[in-house]
Amino acid sequence: MSSPAFNVRRYGRDSSVDRHAFAQWVLPVRGELAFELEGRGARLDLLQGAFVAPLAGHAQAADDNDRFLIVDCPADMFDDDTLERLQRQPVLALPAQVRRMAQRVGTVPDECVEADVVALELPALLEAFSLAGSATRLQAVCARIEAAPGQAWPVERIANEVGVSTSRVHALFQRAFGLSPQGWLSGSRLRWARGRLVDSDAPIASIAQHAGSSEQSALTRALRREWGMTPADYRRRHRSAQ
């Protein structure tokens, strides 16, 4: 491709593996996406997106009511260091300004976004994931939390992982994500629990415990608040969609 493009898409329940010569961001606008990138699985939602490097194999599955902003970019728009860093850590905690942009652009009725909108919005997206981006220094600790959300993650541990004080890590998370460290942790734990509800037969109480909840009722409250359904309802709905 010769120029960047924004497209608003919905995905079906199944897809084959795709590869393309350009780079791509996958930014959820509504709902969530079961995403596989070079054999690595992840769940994407309003707090977490993905970067697909050129020629990386990827596949996805979603419910019919979900919606995503897909940003295609020529590979030569990236310097080598940035491209290597995004290839190494392709599942990304989404900065607040990127989430706002996805909502602003991704709710338009047209599937292909006008070129003038792309020209206006793309520089901020590129900046957000550059070395100077407000969330860049937090991506590593967010990935570690995502890999083991049920572990104990007090603010002191998160601050130590980043190499700053607890007050500073609060400021960094608020600036980058519009959330406290514990707010981001809660989102990661709930995302993990949703995946286990769909992909395993584990008892709900066990899922809640391994997600860091003190009891099943805490998971029930969180899922009902964020998704409007109980864990049992969520499991039933998403399994019937498979």
Image (cartoon, helix red, strand yellow):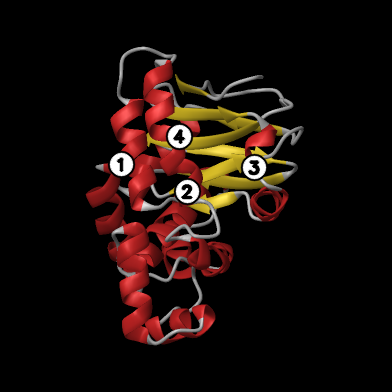
Viewer-proximal residue among 51 and 193: 51
Residue 43 lies left or right of residue 80; in this view the side is: left
Q: Which residue is mark 1?
A: 100
In primary-sequence order, the first of circles 4 and 2 is 4
Q: Which mark is residue 122?
A: 4
Q: Position of residue 115 (x, y in %)?
A: 43, 17
Determine which quarter of the picture holds residue 214. Answer: bottom left
Q: CA distance from mark 4 to mark 2?
A: 9 Å
Residue closer to the observer: 182 or 51: 51
Position of residue 15 measured from the top left corner of the image (x, y, whole percent): 64, 23
**Left of 200 or right of it: where is 36?**
right
For residue 219, what is the image quadrant? bottom left
Going from N to C along the chain, the mark reached first, 3 or 2, is 3
Mark carried by residue 127: 2
Q: Which three-letter amino acid code belongs to the residue tagged 4?
A: Leu
Label 4 SS: helix
Nearer the viewer's eye, disc 1 or disc 3? 3
